[in-house]
Image (cartoon, rainbow, N blue to C red):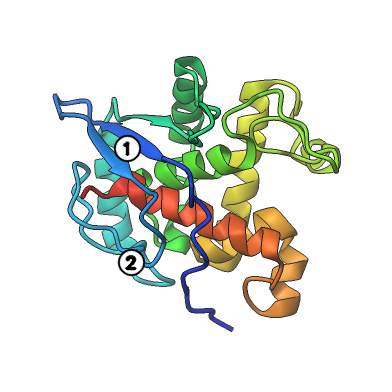
Amino acid sequence: MTQRWSPFPDLTRGAGLALWLMAAQGAVAEVIDLGAGTEDLRVRASVLDFGKELPKRGDLNGAEFTDKADADADDEGLLVLASYGTTQKGRGPRGSAEIEHLILDVGDDYLRHPALKAAGLSGTEWLALFRANIAVESAFNPNARSSVGAIGLGQLMPGTADLLGVDPHDPEDNLHGSARYLLAQLEDFGAADLALAAYNAGPEAVRDYGGIPPYAETEGHVAKVLRLTNATLSSE
């Protein structure tokens, strides 16, 4: 069953969330304030030339995807830097330059993965989605540990890391595991929202509910990641 996206309560209220978007070919950095709410999740015209919503299931046929993937894969040097989670009480976590470049380098390795075609995502959209998921999962902290034992940048559970054949304590390995796991969900479910829900709550929960499970944590995770993804791709 296809679940239509609806906005959730503003999960950045009280936070001054801003992103600096820099394109390689001399683009001027832009600042996007995400504190205004979540109702408008549209992707508007931007420095990355995206004037549309994140694609829905089956929006791109094979030929269109191939053209877009080739163009995105050849567009080297895209750099996305962020200050994430800054509050009135002080600065929140932010991605170091090293971590930001590592996320981009790992994401680049999967620009031609068939899961992107299955989910109707371009390479640029994939990079934004992958980075946003890491931002929300761990706030770019390679030493992050959750109360249930999830590890590192992608918050991989030890069992999941074992299945993926990665060392969750190594930042680069952790990112590769995170990317491959997210891509597996994109390939299985064919849509970014469902893939994010499966990443957070497990694919069985998404199948059982026929859509995003009605868990506050999962709904919040999907909302945050999609909002950050769309903001990365859009400009005011």
Position of residue 89 measured from the top left corner of the image (x, y, whole percent): 54, 31
Q: Is residue 177 left or right of residue 160?
A: left
Crowding around mark 1 (Cα neighbors within 10 Å: few <14, some 14 to 19, many 20+) is some
Q: Residue 60 shows which numbered tag?
A: 2
Which disc is residue 168 wearing? none
Q: Residue at x 52, y 21 (%)?
A: 99
Nearest the camera: 208 or 41? 41
Residue 212, compared with residue 225, is above or below; it is below
CA gap, disc 1 and disc 2? 17 Å
Q: Earlier in the sequence, mark 1 or mark 2?
A: 2
Comparing 135 with 50, the one in front is 135
> Which residue is label 1 attached to?
73
The image position of residue 50, as x and y in percent, is 23, 53
> In this picture, is 34 found above or below 54?
above
Amino acid type of the residue tagged 2 in the rendering: Leu
Say whether residue 89 is left or right of residue 207: left
Q: Identify the residue at the far bottom of this view.
A: 1
Residue at image location 22% in from the left, 57% down from the top: 44
The quarter holding residue 37 reads bottom left
Farthest top residue?
98
Check disc 1 and report its element: helix, strand or loop: helix
Q: Locate residue 105 relative to residue 93 in the image: left or right.
A: left
What number of labels is visible? 2
Q: Position of residue 81 (x, y in %)?
A: 38, 28
Query: Image point 47% across, 74% down: which residue?
Result: 6
Q: Residue at horizontal 22%, vertical 25%? A: 24
